[in-house]
Image (cartoon, helix red, strand yellow):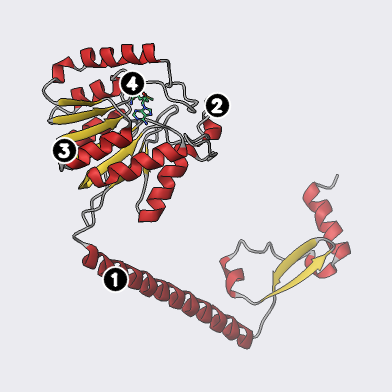
């Protein structure tokens, strides 16, 4: 009984008599240097070496040489282009060198922020939106070099604000008292501003000192967040960090509704929109914590000039 290979050879010799006895192509290195002829049978495509003249050999070699030359040319052209981009970047960097800041270390969660502040020898900060003082306590514990931590919170219910932290006044009072108790160990370093964040910003500006770090976590609607970012940015020292909680748009925070601003206007982009608008306006990169389960923090570094 004929084997499969024998049957295929018979079939092929019927389809194309010349190919039946053709040597197995592509496996011999000789094949690569020899002129080839191609033909098709049905849906199949065959290549086979032809008994070529030395002229054919020569033309194959010339074609190969031309191919190699073209590849080399492309390679050196690429090198040249990369070089010129690098040189251009270096040139533009040298003119801005005094403003360029090294990147911050990677920040996985907002708990890393205090460690970074300590690592950078920063000493002063403001937290806008304090509630029970939980994040403030964490920061003060893990930022031992901190010498001044300003706490800004209204500790009062607000109209037209659909946020889970907008609780009734009784709860706010309890939170305020709890914060004072919790932060007693740092009494000498903390300053309280129980008022709207916009009023506190004006007061702090009058004090005439910038800080190394500001954390925005008060109103989460677009207008409120935008106002805090704009009013506190001038209070950050060059080289300092403006950061905040909840880098989110309204569709990510249901059942809260952060699309409504205090004046009743609708802006579904919420915190994310306010942060990105500011960053784009000033052409500054935004960092976002990359290993939170939710409620990511964001930050922008203030250039030196
Ligand atoms: C989400 S809580 C802050 C949580 C805190 N940062 C933490 O992580 O532990 C928001 C706080 O911001 C305060 N707040 C909201 N809008 C404010 C405003 N316009 N001015 C001052 N405080 C405000 C609220 O009273 C509330 O206590």
Query: Where, quadrant-wise, is the N terminus in this rendering?
Result: top right
Label 1 CB, ligand 1: below 8 Å? Answer: no
- Residue 43 located left or right of residue 231: right
Query: In terms of sequence position, does the residue under pointer 3 or pointer 2 come before the other?
Result: 3
Closest to the observer, 73 or 4: 73
Q: How far apart are marks 3 and 4 (CA)?
A: 28 Å
Report crowding for label 2: few under 14, some 14 to 19, many 20 or more residues within 10 A (C-alpha): few
Label 4 CB, ligand 1: below 8 Å? Answer: yes
Label 1 sits on a secondary structure element that is helix
Query: Which residue position is annotated with label 1?
Result: 87
Query: Where, quadrant-wise, is the C terminus in this rendering?
Result: bottom left
Q: Position of residue 239 (x, y in %)?
A: 21, 48
Which of the two discs, 4 and 1, sits closer to the camera? 4
Q: Can residue 105 be seen in this view?
A: no
Query: Which residue position is annotated with label 4?
Result: 155
Q: Which residue is drawn at 58% across and 74% down?
A: 33
Up-down relation of residue 178 to residue 251 (above or below): above
Query: Which residue position is annotated with label 3?
Result: 122
Cβ–Cβ below 8 Å for labels 1 and 2? no
Label 3 CB, ligand 1: below 8 Å? Answer: no
Which of the two discs, 1 and 2, sits closer to the camera? 2
Report crowding for label 1: few under 14, some 14 to 19, many 20 or more residues within 10 A (C-alpha): few
Q: Position of residue 125 (x, y in %)?
A: 21, 34
Q: How far apart are marks 1 and 2 (CA)?
A: 49 Å
Label 2 sits on a secondary structure element that is loop
Q: Distance between the residues labelled 4 and 2?
A: 23 Å
Q: Farthest bottom residue? A: 55
Query: In terms of sequence position, does the residue under pointer 1 or pointer 2 come before the other?
Result: 1
Q: Position of residue 57 (x, y in %)?
A: 60, 82
Closest to the observer, 120 or 18: 120
Closest to the observer, 279 or 191: 191
């Amino acid at each position: 009984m004929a084997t499969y290979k024998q049957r295929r050879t018979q079939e092929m010799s019927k389809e194309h008599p010349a190919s039946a006895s053709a040597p197995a192509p592509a496996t011999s290195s000789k094949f690569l240097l020899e002129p080839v002829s191609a033909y098709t049978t049905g849906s199949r495509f065959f290549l086979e070496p032809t008994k070529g003249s030395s002229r054919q050999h020569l033309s194959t070699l010339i074609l190969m040489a031309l191919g190699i030359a073209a590849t080399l040319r492309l390679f050196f052209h690429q090198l040249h282009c990369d070089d010129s981009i690098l040189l251009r970047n270096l040139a533009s960097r040298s003119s801005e060198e005094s403003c360029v800041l090294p990147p911050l270390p990677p920040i996985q969660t907002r708990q890393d922020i205090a460690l970074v502040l300590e690592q950078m020898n920063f000493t002063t900060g403001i937290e806008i939106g304090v509630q029970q003082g939980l994040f403030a306590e964490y920061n003060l514990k893990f930022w031992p070099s901190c010498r001044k931590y300003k706490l800004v919170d209204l500790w009062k219910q607000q109209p037209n604000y659909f946020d889970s932290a907008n609780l009734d006044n009784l709860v706010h009072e309890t939170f305020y008292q709890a914060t004072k108790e919790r932060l007693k160990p740092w009494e000498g370093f903390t300053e309280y501003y129980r008022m709207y964040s916009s009023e506190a910003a004006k007061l702090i500006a009058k004090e005439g000192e910038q800080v190394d770090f500001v954390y925005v976590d008060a109103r989460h609607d677009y207008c409120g967040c935008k106002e805090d970012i704009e009013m506190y940015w001038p209070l950050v020292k060059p080289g300092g960090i403006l950061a905040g909680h909840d880098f989110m748009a309204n569709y990510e925070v249901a059942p809260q509704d952060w699309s409504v601003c205090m004046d009743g206007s609708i802006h579904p982009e919420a915190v994310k929109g306010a942060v990105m608008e500011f960053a784009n306006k000033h052409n500054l990169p935004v960092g976002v914590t990359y290993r939170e389960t939710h409620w990511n923090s964001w930050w922008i570094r203030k250039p030196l000039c």
